[in-house]
Amino acid sequence: MATLNDRLRLISERIKEDKFIEGRGLGNEISFYIFDYDPKDELAVRDHVTSLHKEFQGGLYNRRIIEFDLYKMLIEITKEKRIFDRIPEMETKQGKDALFKAMTTFAKPDMFLAKIKEQIGDHNVVLLTGVGKVYPFVRSHNILNNLQGVLDKTPVIMFFPGEYDGQSLQLFSKFKDDNYYRAFRLVD
């Protein structure tokens, strides 16, 4: 079985492949990939995402990478909607359940998709991070399902702290996120 470092090194090799950027060999499927990993390796994976930015900066290999951290996006959205400062008070006065209900009602995939559309520009590789940090307010399969209509020709790599078996997502190797069949494991 490959080590985490071996698997991380393979990410760059996959991104450099022509078939990755062109979506060839996927049976006309969308180019969505999941890099799953043990949640205890979160910091190493974050560091590697930073190194991917450095490796491909300047359009090297004709790859222009953009990262969307779902947690940071959620914070931005709450600030834009002027509710960020009220969140601690809501949790204190109304409890965690009320906060959860309010946030899940509020944090809809279309808000994230609008930000992605607005910011993607001429980038041709999308990295989705922050999946674990934004749980349970945002579910990764909801983002992927809705992203299909927005980025059907742009490869997307979701960094997923848990397990993906090609059929279902299990966040933190404990919580079943949901079935998701349209993504491919980036590296085994």
Image (cartoon, rainbow, N blue to C red):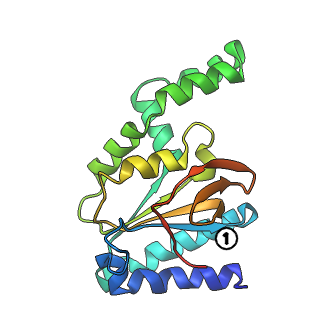
Name the element at disc 1. Answer: helix
| Image side of residue 170 versus residue 82, left or right | right
Do we see residue 58 in this rendering? no
Query: Could you say which is closer to the camera, residue 21 or residue 168?
Result: 168
Q: Is residue 102 above or below residue 188?
A: above
Residue to which mark 1 is pinned:
44
Q: Position of residue 148 (x, y in %)?
A: 35, 54
Q: Position of residue 50 (x, y in %)?
A: 52, 70
Q: Is residue 154 above or below residue 131?
A: below
The quarter of the picture where the N terminus appears is bottom right
Near mark 1 (Cα within 10 A), the count class, few <14, some 14-19 or many ≥20, is few
Q: Position of residue 137 (x, y in %)?
A: 58, 36
The quarter of the picture where the C terminus appears is bottom right
Q: Residue at x 73, y 57 (%)?
A: 173
Q: Residue at x 32, y 85 (%)?
A: 18
Query: Could you say which is closer to the camera, residue 110 or residue 179?
Result: 179
The amino acid beneath tag 1 is: Ala
Do we see residue 52 in this rendering? yes
